[in-house]
Image (tube, rainbow, N blue to C red):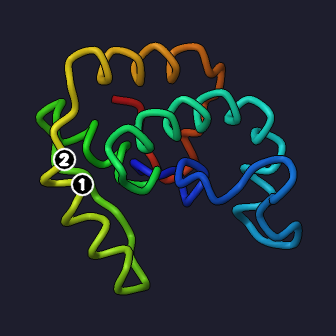
Amino acid sequence: MVLEQGALTGRYDTRHPFPADSDRGAVYNPMLPQLEKLNAGLKEIADKHGVAIAQLPVAWAIAKGTLPIIGVTKVYQVEDAAKAAALELTADEIEIMKRLAGETPLNVIRYWEKEM
């Protein structure tokens, strides 16, 4: 999942965790400290483009030649996905995102996902 159930949207951090009694909270709240550096880097790039943080992982996946699958439940999420498809990241920005992701020592493969 490109946005990791919302963990890469900039909406959640150690001060604003997922609801503790939710499945997402159980999986991602312990990871939020490690995700903060990655989300901070995403915010910096998003601010340069004037876009939402959530658009960057989608745009990155598209730039890598994939078709990202995202779950949407709100109109603004569809609008963000459309904007992400039009967002052109620089080679440097793609490399920064790759480096930040590589520096985030997490494995979020869940039981229904297969290693690729």
Q: Quadrant of residue 83?
A: bottom left
Image spot of residue 101 (x, y percent): 50, 23
Secondary structure at badge 2 equals loop
Secondary structure at badge 1 equals helix
104 vs 66: above or below: above
Residue 17 lies left or right of residue 65; in this view the side is right
Classify mark 2: residues with Cα within 10 Å, few (<14), some (14-19) or many (20+): some
Amino acid, disc 2? Leu
Q: Nearer the viewer, residue 57 or 27?
A: 57
Residue 37 lies left or right of residue 82; in this view the side is right
Classify mark 1: residues with Cα within 10 Å, few (<14), some (14-19) or many (20+): many
Which residue: 46% across, 13% down? 99
**Tally of marks:** 2
Q: Quadrant of residue 5?
A: bottom right
Which residue: 28% across, 36% down? 60
Residue 84: which disc? 1
Q: Nearer the viewer, residue 34 or 110?
A: 34
83 vs 38: above or below: below
Residue 11: which disc? none
Image spot of residue 110 (x, y percent): 57, 46
Residue 68 lies left or right of residue 75; in this view the side is left
Query: Alpha carbon of mark 2 to alpha carbon of mark 1: how far?
Result: 5 Å
Which residue: 28% across, 15% down? 92
| Residue contact between numbered discs 2 and 1, judged by CB atoms under 8 Å | yes
18 vs 32: above or below: below
Image spot of residue 73 (x, y percent): 43, 84
28 vs 41: above or below: below
Residue 90 lies left or right of residue 106; in this view the side is left
Residue 87: which disc? 2
Which residue: 33% across, 29% down? 116
Image spot of residue 7 (x, y percent): 61, 51
Amino acid, disc 1? Ala
